[in-house]
Image: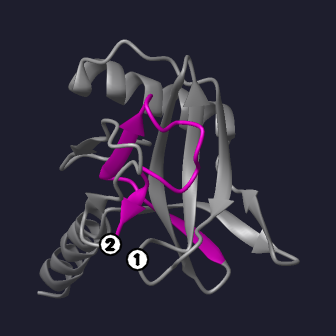
Amino acid sequence: MIRKYVFILVVLGLFSVKASGQVCIGKLVNGEPQFRKNPDELLENYNAFIAEYADMKVHFTSVSFVRSQDSAISYDYNLVFIGSGFRGSMGVQLEGDELMAVDKTTCITAECASSMFECAPAHGQSCTPCTNDGDCIKIASTESMLR
């Protein structure tokens, strides 16, 4: 009987982690974001996801944390991917000192890629618009984009 309850708790625990749509990618150290996951692995996984599921011909070559300008609209930080004239970003929520990527929605642009705060993830799985009326592509998934 105890084994059944342990199994149910383990299964429920697995579903709650998956359902949250977040993965710990970093930590604040002396107030500065630091990667906990290997940035090269994050890039590889993000590029693979975009190529396979979004069918986009882009290649991102760097990834960094950017503090959001207005956490009332967007997340505490953005995980920003730069490369080949495009910028992609996903929200990062601060939970204690851990940086949790909201890794099931991303926003990608070429037309306002020079601004870190346009075409950026906003609460509610949306993207902020480009102020120059450029295209901002939102990609949402039931799968993690970083694993």
The residue tagged 2 is 123
Q: Residue furthest top?
A: 57
Q: Position of residue 20 (x, y in %)?
A: 29, 70
Tell which circle, 1 or 2, labels the residue nearer the N-terminal end. Answer: 1
Q: Residue at x 34, y 37 (%)?
A: 134
Picture coordinates of residue 40, whole percent (x, y) = 66, 31
- Gap between marks 1 and 2, in whole Å? 6 Å
Magenta segment range?
A: 98-122
Residue 111 rendering spot, x and y as whole percentages: 43, 31
Q: Residue furthest front?
A: 132
- The disc labelled 2 sits on which kind of residue? His
Q: Nearer the viewer, mark 1 or mark 2?
A: 1
**SS for callout 2:** loop
Which residue is drawn at the image coordinates 59% and 69% (left, top)? 99
Q: Find numbered disc 1 in the image and state the secondary structure of the residue it sits on.
A: loop
Quick one: 25 or 110, which is closer to the camera? 110
Please say if 66 is above or below 68: above
Residue in the foreground of this view, choosing between 3 and 98: 98
Answer with the quarter of the image where residue 32 lies.
bottom right
